[in-house]
Amino acid sequence: MMDGPRSDVGRWGGNPLQPPTTPSPEPEPEPDRRSHRRGFWARCCGCCSCRNEADDDWGPEPSGSRGRGSRSGGRRTDSRGSDSRRPVSRGSGVNAAGDGTIREGMLVVTGVDLLSSRSDQNRREHHTDEFEYDELIVRRGQPFHIVILLSRPYESSDRITLELLIGNNPEVGKGTHVIIPVGKGGSGGWKAQVTKANGKDLNLRVHTSPNAIIGKFQFTVRTHTDAGEFQLPFDPRNEIYILFNPWCPEDIVYVDHEDWRQEYVLNESGRIYYGTEAQIGERTWNYGQFDHGVLDACLYILDRRGMPYGGRGDPVSVSRVISAMVNSLDDNGVLIGNWSGDYSRGTNPSAWVGSVEILLSYLRTGYSVPYGQCWVFAGVTTTVLRCLGLAARTITNFNSAHDTDTSLTMDIYFDENMKPLEHLNHDSVWNFHVWNDCWMKRPDLPSGFDGWQVVDATPQETSSGIFCCGPCSVESIKNGLVYMKYDTPFIFAEVNSDKVYWQRQDDGSFKIVYVEEKAIGSLIVTKAIGSNMREDITHTYKYPEGSEAERKAVETAAAHGSKPNVYATRDSAEDVAMQVEAQDAVMGQDLTVSVLLTNRSSSRRTVKLHLYLSVTFYTGVTGTIFKETKKEVVLAPGASDRVAMPVAYKEYQPHLVDQGAMLLNVSGHVKENGQVLAKQHTFRLRTPDLSLTLLGAAVVGQECEVQIVFKNPLPVTLTNVVFRLEGSGLQRPKILNVGDIGGNETVTLRQTFVPVRPGPRQLIASLDSPQLSQVHGVIQVDVAPATGGGSFFSDARGDSHSGEAIPMASRGGA
């Protein structure tokens, strides 16, 4: 593991850029959950920490959960056709004495049919028919239907009780043991009614509570007659998954827009945005929340944290635990963060194309998966939230601040000549940062803070001693109410703080010389509903820049920070305007950056200008300056002039780090009036896309072929090239090792896959090598149903944890 949360180069301001020690993918031994359980919950969730040490539903993972090396129990290994009626479970019952004796006159339950097939009414009405499971999956607060098979026809005097149990020691008082008398009103919204009695078959309509615990429940049926009590044995085939329900008005996760539910709950793929505000890149991410095994992985995350079952009906607590568990710090969670640039002991974060491979690996091994960065943490978090039934979306904030001293300002320090003092610049501005919004009511807050809540699983700062963040009301962020829980000060600073430039004076003190008020949180975006367009949601997080409401929010928040009087020391003189321009450059090509100066006064102005160019991680951590230019510019009244800096490929290539980003620090001094000019401008080098072409029609259950074409944009050989291919309903995560690709060479490869679910699907691919990353492509595949309809499930649908050597179909020169 890493030495500490700030040990990795490329992530934190103030760390020198030098050869790193790669974070190890091997986890620390898992701590005893009972010995640490109270400490976590006392810090993470006050409502869940007030518990007796003897509470038995706290304990280790349930027997159905997996530790390292065991199989998922979510689907039987002989499952083949989910649309066919699954066998009715039958078994020998037990009487009240538990000796298995069936006495004359007892009402025996000979079997139960949960109507759990994907084509059955239950799964369709509960919007769970896309889950690649045979078990019954329902959403709370909404009725479902079952059929009980009896040894004789049902009589109105018969007493039948349904029971659902979860956890190691279920208790009625904690909601972990639910008892539902048939035909009688239950408690808390639970009830069961007879809809039809047909001979020995008894049809029931079962109502669940809109506040029910989410998870996988055991199910049984009890009957009571004068001859004795009978209980149907527990059967793994009768386990019932209960999820949050955004379709239920009584559920606090309710979403009152069907198009929102289709996008934020049911959509299995999405777009994640990266780059810079001026050069926005986008990539498709396979959330895969309905893929087989993913639901079990999501519940395993809660088990692994030791979350009390009694607290699993609260989306505030559940989302907070998810934000802690998707990263590996504190708790050996899902993903190991790595910003060092060395990923030789794991997977380059840019190479992932979806969440499925990551979550299944964690479920299968119990080990944290190497490696992740913010968009990977956010992509996995979206998967987990949607899978459990919470409406969630992936958010990108451009020019995202990381405030290390709770000043709610980004402080950048320069020497007397306005050269950056990197050893003092601990605050950093990320080119972009990706987190999540999830939708819920907040009964733990005053009114007015329902709706979108920020959840951020990227480990940045601790929250009450734990690396988690949120849920935090977007409304509280917008209004600068940094005293609202959870973690509002940190998130507010990410989107709405100011960049403050400090210059060292001759006596060693520092003075504010410039405040850049529109630099932070300049653009906040997400994928639009129902399309692949980009939606600007900046207005939901902040008032218009420069407006009275926006200034009030910033200054209100700053008053609660560590430097409440920072705005009192500002100087301002802005006769000369400055604008930085960078051409749309491609990796491997020369480029030019320039600065445009404009004199807005009626007098001549003389500007002494300094340009410093360095590479930068997307987190704002910079390398050493590898090129600089100094020039004095004389501007006539109203005139403009441009200062250009050409940069050759051979100049920047030795210094490149992840994302191909560079930082231009521009500073200047106006001789006549003492105005200080300061600007930081980040730009990136674009990487090529993969070209995917479908060769033939896609039909469920029939082999289909896709062609992938890639041209190496660099004049150097790419070594150890790895492709990844993934698409929900199309292809389980697949790793393809293709060897080396020569400089400026074009390669083509073909792969076959067998679609398992009909409808519009996304097939996503990526390429990674030590010399080039952030290369990906996507194609939409419209899958026709198999003859006779339905879906096709096979256990041999690609291996999510092994690679195969793939020969290239063809190669071509530049």
Image (cartoon, helix red, strand yellow):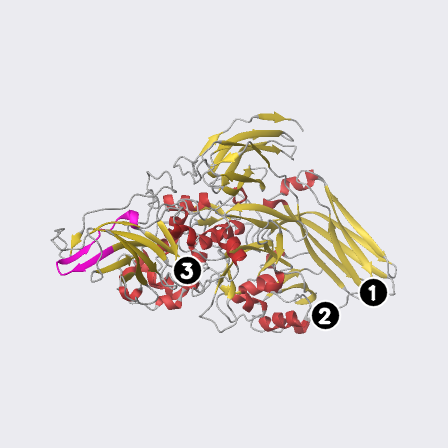
Mark earlier in primary sequence (3, 1):
3
Q: Position of residue 139 (x, y in %)?
A: 40, 57
* Residue bearing the label numbered 3: 318
The C terminus lies in quadrant = top right
Q: Secondary structure at mark 3?
A: helix
Task: Report how far apart the C-alphas of labels 2 and 3 lie in the structure.
Answer: 47 Å
Q: Position of residue 151 (x, y in %)?
A: 19, 51
Q: Is residue 228 magenta?
A: yes
**Residue closest to the eye, 283 or 500:** 283
Using residue 211 as the reference point, say whether residue 440 is left or right of it.
right
Q: Position of residue 364 (x, y in %)?
A: 37, 43
**Residue hosting label 1:** 672
Residue 535: x percent and y percent? 62, 55
The residue range painted magenta reads 221-238
Label whose residue precedes the other's in the sequence (1 or 2): 2
Picture quadrant of residue 197? bottom left
Decide whether residue 376 is among the magenta residues: no
- Compared across the picture, whether 119 is left or right of 545 comes to left
Q: How many marks?
A: 3
Q: Nearer the viewer, residue 623 or 550?
A: 550
Residue 80 versus residue 26: which sits nearer the camera?
80
Q: Amino acid at mark 1?
A: Glu
Residue at 48%, 41% in the rendered image:
758
Left or right of residue 195, residue 400 in this image = right
Q: CA distance from mark 1 to mark 2?
A: 16 Å
Q: Dot 3 surroundings within 10 Å: few (below 14), some, or many (20 or more)? A: some
Q: Quick check: marks 1 and 2 in contact, CB under 8 Å? A: no
290 left or right of 538 in image: left
Residue extending farthest front: 199
Residue 571: mark:
2
